[in-house]
Every structure is written in C-alpha cells, then in structure tokens.
Amino acid sequence: MITIEYRKCIYKGSAFKTMKKLLERFRIYRIKKPNIVILLVILLFNICWFFFSAALISAMAPSSLAHRGFWDSVYYTITMILDAGCIEYVIADIGAVSVGLIIFCVIVVIVGMITFSGAVIGYVTNYISGFIENADSGNTPIKISGHIVILNWNDRAAEIINELLFKGRKERIIVLANADKKLIEQEIYDRVSDTVSKENAVVKLKARQMSPGEGRKYIKEHTLKNRLDIIVREGDSCSTKQLQDISLKSARMVIILENDIRDSADNGSGEDKGNSNTIKALIQVADFTAQEGSAEDQHIVVETGDDWTLELVNKIIRHKEKSGKCNILPITVNHMLGLLLAQFCIMPELNKVYYKLYSNKGAGIFARPYAGQSDIDTEPGRYISVHDHAIPITVMDTGTGSYAYYVADRASDADIISEPSECNYSIKYNNKFWLRQRNILILGHNSRMEEIMNGFYFFREEWNGNPYEDNPEDILNIMVIDDEKSLAEHNYYKEYPYVNRVISTGLYNDKLIHDSITEFVSLNADNTTVLILSDDLAKPEDIDAQALTCLVYIQEILEEKQDENPEFDAGKIDVIVEILNPKNYDVANNYSRNNVVISNRYASKMTTQICEKGGLFDLFRYLMTFGGENAEEYDSKELYIKDVKDFFLETPAPCTAKELITAVYNASPSENKQIVIGSVCDNKIKIFAGNQREIKVELTENDKLIIFCAH
C-alpha cells in the first residue's frame, strides 16, 4: 500500500516537472515566435468553437429536421462564420421552432466574425505589413552582383550617385547608412532630378537651333535618362549580417564615406581622433572582399579626412589587401581639395578644366595597363603623330601596376591609329618663358587651410626666382582676411613667407573688409585671384552663408571700381568662391563672374573616376602637387594654364589642334616637353578631344593654352 502511494507521488512529481518544462519552453517560444503562437491560439480557439457550436446546435435542433446530426451542424457553423448572410438559410433549414437556437446562431456568427474572420484577416494583414516593413528597413537579403555599394552618408554622397548618371548605362547602387532613409532618398531624388532637367533643357535649347529633323535626332541621342536603380537601407555599415544581406562579396565596387567633419566636431571631445567608424567599416569590408568566394578585382575606395585615419587605413591595407581580390584605395579628401584650391588660385581656369576632365561627361583622362611597349612613354612624339583622337599624358608605376594615361573622348579612342603625316606648321616657342607673379586674396577659412598653404609652398618652390630677371619679385603675394580666432589658430600664417599681410576682422565689419579688398585690388590689377572659403565646420544652417556674404562684398567693390574708372577691367580679377552645398550653386553663380567651386562635387567626381577607372588615383595625386616635396627639377608634371602672349614669341597662325599639338611638342626642349591638351578662349574651355585634324584653332594674344608639362 505504501509502495503504491509512493509510486503515485513519484508519478505526480515527474508529471509536474514535465508540465513545468513544457510551460517554460512555451514561454520561451512565445517570446521568440510571438506571431506563430498567436496564430496557433487563433486556430485552436476557432476549432474548439466550431465543434462546441456544432454540438450545441445538433443538440438543440428539432427531431423532425431532415439535416440533423453533428456533422451537418458543423457545416452550418462553418457556413455562418464564413458568410454571416447564410444565417437566414440555416434558420430556414433548421426551422424557427426554437428561439434559443436562433439566438445561439446569432452568437455563433458574432463570435466567429471576431475570432475567426477578424483575427485571421488581422493576422494576415499584420504579416504583410511586417513583410513590407522588413523589406523597407533592410532586413530582407538582396541577391545581386556587379553593383555599387556606398557605406555611410555625407554631403558628397549624392554627388557621387549624380555623377553616375553620365555613364550612359544602367547602374545598380545600394546605400547602407546609419541615417534617415527617407531623407537620403529625398536628397538623391532632388539632386538627380535637378541634373536631368537641367541637362535636358540644354539639349532642347541646342536642338531648337537645328533643323526639325536634326533637332529630333539630337534630342534622341543626347537626352539624359535616369538609368540608376538605387536601394537605400538604414542600418549599421559595420554589421556583418547587413553587409552580407546587400551581397557585398559580389559587388563591383565599394565606397566607404566618412561622416561629415562638422558631425565629428560636435562630439565635444575637442580632440581630432579621426573617424573610427570608417576604420571599423573598412575592416569588415576587407574581410568580406578578401574571401575566396568574393568577386574578382573589387575596388574599395575609402575616404580619409585626417592623418590618424589614413595611417590606420594603410595598416589595414598591408594586412588585408590581396592582389586581384581586395584592392583598397584611400582618398585623402581634405588634402586633395586643399591642393586643388591652391591650384585654382594660381591658375583659375584649371577649375573648369578639371571639372571637365574629372567628369563622366565628355572628354576625360583614361588609363590603360602599360607593359613597356607603347610609344606613349618611349617616343611620345611618335605617339602624337599616329594618334589623332588621343593625347598622351604620362606613364606611371602605381600600387596596382603600370599605366599609360591619355586624354580623349572615349577609352577606345586610343585604339584609333592613323598614318603619320609630316607637319609643316611651325611656331616660335619662348625658351625663356616664366610665370608672372600671382596675387591672391583669401577671405575666410576652412578645415583645409594647411593643405591650401602647402599647395602654395610647392608652387613657390618650383617657380620662385625668375632666372631671366636681375631682381625677380616673389612669385606669390598673398593676403588673408579672417576672424581673430582662426588667424590665431594658424599663428597668423607667420611660417609662410609668401603671406605678406593678414587682417583680423569679423564678417560684419563691412567697412574694414571693403577698404582692405579695395586696396589690394587697386595695387594688384593683374594676375589677381580672390578666394572666398566656406567654413565646413559651421552649423548646417550656416553652411556657405559667410562665403555668399563675402561674394556680395567683392562684386560690389568690382562694380564700384568699374564705375570710377571705365578702363578698369573687372574680368581680370578672378573670383573663386567655394560652395559646400550644391543647392547654393545657382545663388553663387549669379554673383560670380568667373568661378564657383563646389568642393564636395569635386571630391565626388574624383571618387567616381577612381572607382570606375583603374590607376587614376595615383595620377590625380601626382597632378595636384607642383614638383612634390622631394622632387628634383623637371621631375614632376602638372597641368598648366599658360598665356599665349608669354608662351610664344609670336601669336601662332590659325591651324588645327593636331598641328598645334605637334608643333609645340617638337619645339619645346627635350628635358621639358610641352603637350597641349586644350585652349582657353574668351573664358571658354576647349579640350582637344575627338578628331584633332578637324578641330580648328585660332589663337589671340589674350588666349591661354592648357598644357601638360614639368615646368
């Protein structure tokens, strides 16, 4: 007896433990899969309700009813629940002999509508909404290949996407950023739509100047179409799963952007410790792209805005980069933009030249792998003589191999070879050519001041001290007008001997600014450039405000000078205004007579070109530094803007681009061959791309040439 009771206790105890484990599992499952638990509860309750209702209806139905029984009652129940209107036929079939039965049928309909129809419809609706929400938030994997991935978001990102419009082919782009998805999509839409409408308006305007037939053909061939498929995902660029979900391993290229510098500046630390998010993203991307299953020859372009980030990126490259698999290219954005702005101050026309060459639209710089057999390096003169559609630049050894560079309309133009012809055209080359003094007025500041000043330093090292003059003046004469805080941070530019004067004043001290600018312009009427900088550390709402205000000052002063002296040529004063937000471009362009530089747009153009064309990264870096830090004489080559009146002893006669290119190359000294790639006539840039024999050139002494050379 005791044994039986003991066994019962054991049984009850084990049953209790089993029940407890089942309840614990259910609770865990309910937390992990609440949607499935809810669905099971709905189904279980409705099954029980079906059978309970059927049993009750069967019991309450009169004995005289033909369709009497449990399964007939189940049919009645299901019919009423699925279609409430069927209750009329059910009652008619049962017979109105029992008021209680009729009331219960109504209850069955009401409960069934709530617990079955309503609950199931609600569940399915919620499931569909969840599916849409997951797809929208980026939880659904995307299985594609050959696409472009952009990680993170900043002011330059929309410009990168915009530049891809001019590729003339369908591009698939996935953006993964820890930012508001709708805001990013709206920014992309605004930028791309604005470009398409403006470009097509220009096409239609040109078409109106043609015959109807030619105009329609021109519109059909040149209308810009948005062929970009863009997917924006809000998420973490360092997440392994999210990177896997966007098919990173099969992407054609990956662009890792830095956060906006002003965002980093607002962190309150007061220390410049680089961008750690960029480093983390690069480590993850390098792990993915270096794997055996990843696509071949993937390009990873990563922005580095400071030395700390660049140093870490280079360490990652040494550890992670694999030839043919994971090709990492760091772009030092601030360094390159600073050197560019310095070059634009010295030769303002380079702004429009680079804008053309760095674009996917029209003439550009192209690179081809070089194995040592090409005339482009061994005999550039021979290359020029047999190529009418491509202009040789140089040959360079880069981190990804040797490349030959040339200027042309299309990459395939280098394959067009013609019979060499004898050039009888001649010019009188000035062997004593030297650049004139450059007078530069800088208004304001940005985070690239050190790079800008270094650009001036390299130029001065190359050109200071004209050997053909007894007492040559300094090649640079620079004045800086800025607020006291910024001047103090840069030690009032005392370490730069070419900065001859600094003026401390606030933005709203218009009289001092007005008088200082007027004095500088009056003393330096030739070869003068006014550079207006936009503070990239300003609050978003204040971006470009100071630059636009200074631009108004400058144009007012130039108009006053013109009124005072009708012979004063305001066009000789080149005004370069730096704009960060492309939305302010039209405002600045309405005021500026010469140049508007959109820094972010230049950085985006360079990024896109580097991604699309292998080998361009090293060339861009090479072009931006006059001479370089350790370069010997005539060791480094750059693009120069040279005045026709100084470059030649006599203005050349009208000719073709082919004749001019050949004659200048042949006449220039062997240690410093001059390669003409275009001209500047009436402030209009013409690159000699296309068939050079068909391009007519008629120079005046006021025109300028675009020349690639060492000096």
Image (spheres, grey):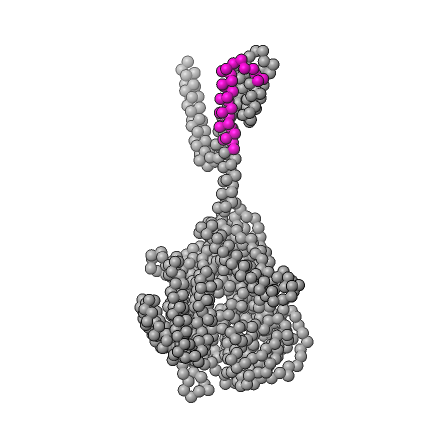
- Farthest top residue? 63
Residue 599 magenta? no
- Farthest right residue? 419
Q: Nearer the viewer, residue 529 or 537?
A: 529
Query: Residue at point 56% right, 21% down?
Result: 88
**Left-right relation of 390 to 497:** right
**Left-right relation of 318 to 169:** left
Extent of the magenta region: 92-121
Q: Nearer the viewer, residue 19 or 137?
A: 137
Residue 245: image x %, image y %?
A: 52, 48
SS assignment for the magenta stretch, majority: helix
Instruction: Identify whether 581 is placed above or below 454.
Output: above
Query: Residue at point 63% right, 60% down?
Result: 220
Residue 536: image x %, image y %?
A: 40, 62
**Left-right relation of 241 to 216:** left
Instruction: Identify whether 20 is placed above or below 163.
Output: above
Residue 98: image x %, image y %?
A: 52, 14
Query: Residue at point 40% right, 60% down?
Result: 261
Residue 100 magenta? yes
Residue 206: image x %, image y %?
A: 59, 66
Q: Nearer the viewer, residue 524 or 35?
A: 524
Residue 675 showing in the rendered view? yes
Q: Nearer the viewer, residue 658 or 489?
A: 658
